[in-house]
Amino acid sequence: MLFGGLFIVRKRALSAATSFAVLLSSAALVAGSAAPAAADSVVPLNVGTVGDMVVDGVHQRLYFSDTYNSRVVVTDFAGRFVKAIPDLAYVRDLDLSADSGTVYAALENADKLVAIDTERLAVTAEYPTGQGTKPSTVAAVDGRLWFGYGENWDSELGSVDLTTAVPTVALALTTGADWSSPPTLRTHPAAPGTLVAADGAISSGPIVVYDTGSGTPVARTSTQRQGFVNDIEIAPDGKSVVAADRVTSLTRLSLTDLSELESFPVSWSSEGGVAVAPDGTVAGATGDRDDVGDVFVFAGGSGTPASVRDTRSWPAYDGMQWAPDSTRLFVPVQLPGQSAYSLRIYTSPKLHAVTVTVKVPSGAPINKPLTVSGSVASTLRLPSGTPLTVTRYDAENPGGKALGTRPTAANGTFSFPDTPAAAGKVSYRVAYPGDAKHAYSTGTAAVQVTPFSTYLKLDQNRRTVDYGTNVTYTASLGWSYRNRVVEIWADPYGSEPKRLLKRGTVNSAGKLSVTTRMTRDTWVTADFAGDTRSGRAHVGSTVYTRAGLTTSLSRHYKWSKIGTIWYQTYHQTGDVLVTAWNNPYPGRTTKYEVQVWYAGAWRTGSEEYVRLDSGGMAYILFDGAGAAGVRARVRTAYVDGVSGDNVNTTIHGAWKYFNVTR
């Protein structure tokens, strides 16, 4: 009987060989064009609440009272953050001086008014109004600051005289009214010596027009509107005011006697805001029955149909303001699901809004006609035959290709065929150019166009080769539009990383070849990236590589020929040393098998798996004591999945024959 010994190297766990799949998808083209200069926009503000907003045309800035955060936030006309002025306790109302040099702010929780220099953007003066006064509204006119203060029915009207060496505060100046809350205060350069005050806290809250030329407010006229006057503005004609309330919504009143001059048709409103542009255009903000905000714009009086903008959010009614040139309307809004405010900038608010809707199929084959359809709608109906400009954007025309104009039908719809010649994302942009009454508008829709299929083949699949064999792989590419580049990648089993074997242009026969030395089972792929008309292609080929293997015997004292077989002959006092090698891999073992000639046949004596060292070597020692007269043979093998890994394919080495003598 034979006894064996072996040298064992340290053991290391293996992971199974992994095949990597390549995920293919069509190239997505994001196409578009620059929006016109007059595009509406919405930008986030660094503002948590909006108590009020004023517009400084001289410095091109907007000022927001961020009440709950006790600060004033300054932005440019695009809504970009400029500066925050902190430590303004519960700042509420704001007003801009006639020369745009100062913004005045009412600080309810600090019992004072402050002056903010518009050049330095810092507080430069403070005007205490008295302990517990809680000023919350402010208006500047003729060298005085008028302010509303107090709470509930203890509310009053006060002033700060800025013309004296030391500013003088006067309180309890109300005449002609009994305020249920601090009144909203408005002044205008077109109405010198005039202060308008309105109480919006109750349904019958008064509106009072004061003469202030003497420095003491004298009630000129008053009225009680039935509907919570939420906002009021003096018109630039200096002869009227426009009031927003919950009942009549939006009305113009005479500044002389507060009689109603006209009513503006707007939607039902839970609250309302108003802004009157320097050119007299009236804008009213409402909350409609769908709980979304609308902005109505009247450019030619109440008889002119309103241009309506759906804010798709709740506007801050006290903050809506026009730009000094009357071309832009700034509306702070609270977007759905957001706590902070954003700024909607309407750049053509006096024009009727136009909505262009475009429809295309979700997918279509290349070079086949499809239908582009849609509709055009406006708050002021467009005539039949209105021309629309059509542009197509695709991989071959990323800057756009003009497809001419298409007319609308009587009901505002349009439809036309087109045949896309490029694959991937194809966008159709339909534009209405605008006119004297309608705003420019566009609509876009995209279709995913399927490319032509591409033929790609890679040879050598399922071939099995010996370790160290050089294998030539050839990729064959069929028709493609422009791209003729193919990549061939090798991804060996086990821990060896995927690598690029070759990247190149196929020859005139559409072929690209590369030769590589095989040391492991390997997943080889050919990849074609596609082009604007030809689809991506990916094919794979698995070539199995037998493990490298050598087996040798040593320490024999001679060779003996028995029959037709040569044996290595050992003394029974010696040892048989088997040296085995497989190409190394962490944790790999080699299998040895010993057979003995007995009763006219080879019969298995023993078999075992032996750990290889880091160089892939194993040494197996058989003790020959007492084995005189034995004829045996031995071989080693790598067995896929059993020898510690599955990186290579199974191989059995040749038998090595030996016999033992005395």
Image (spheres, rainbow, N blue to C red):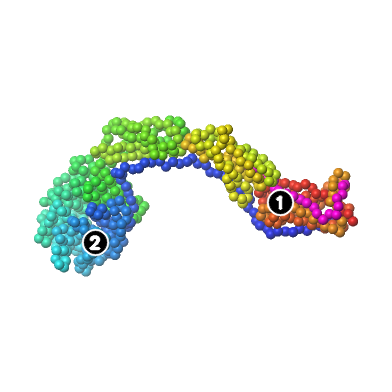
Which mark, residue 593?
Answer: none
On the image, the x and y values in percent for residue 175 come to 12, 60
Q: Position of residue 130 (x, y in %)?
A: 20, 68
Which residue corresponds to mark 2?
116
Q: Which residue is mark 1?
A: 582
Q: Percent position (x, y) of residue 476?
A: 58, 35
Which quadrant would residue 8 be assigned to in this image?
A: bottom right
- The quadrant the N terminus occupies is bottom right
Q: Residues within 10 Å of mark 2 (few under 14, many from 20)?
A: many
The residue sitting at 22% across, 62% down in the picture is: 115
Query: Callout 1: helix, strand or loop?
Result: strand
In this rendering, would 565 be left or right of 61?
right
Q: Main secondary structure of the magenta part?
A: strand
What residue is shown at x 50% (from left), y 34% (from top)? 481
Q: Give above or below for 458 relative to 60.
A: above
Q: Residue furthest bottom?
A: 131
SS at mark 2 in the image = strand
Task: Specify start and end residues of the magenta stretch as a single range.
Answer: 541-562
Q: Quadrant of the C terminus?
A: bottom right
364 left or right of 661? left
What kind of residue is marked 2? Ile
Q: Is residue 135 above or below residue 453?
A: below
Residue at image position (71%, 48%) is: 548
Among the 4 quarters of the image, the one containing residue 95: bottom left
As shown in the figure, which amino acid type bears the numbered disc 1? Asn
Q: CA distance from mark 2 to mark 1?
A: 84 Å
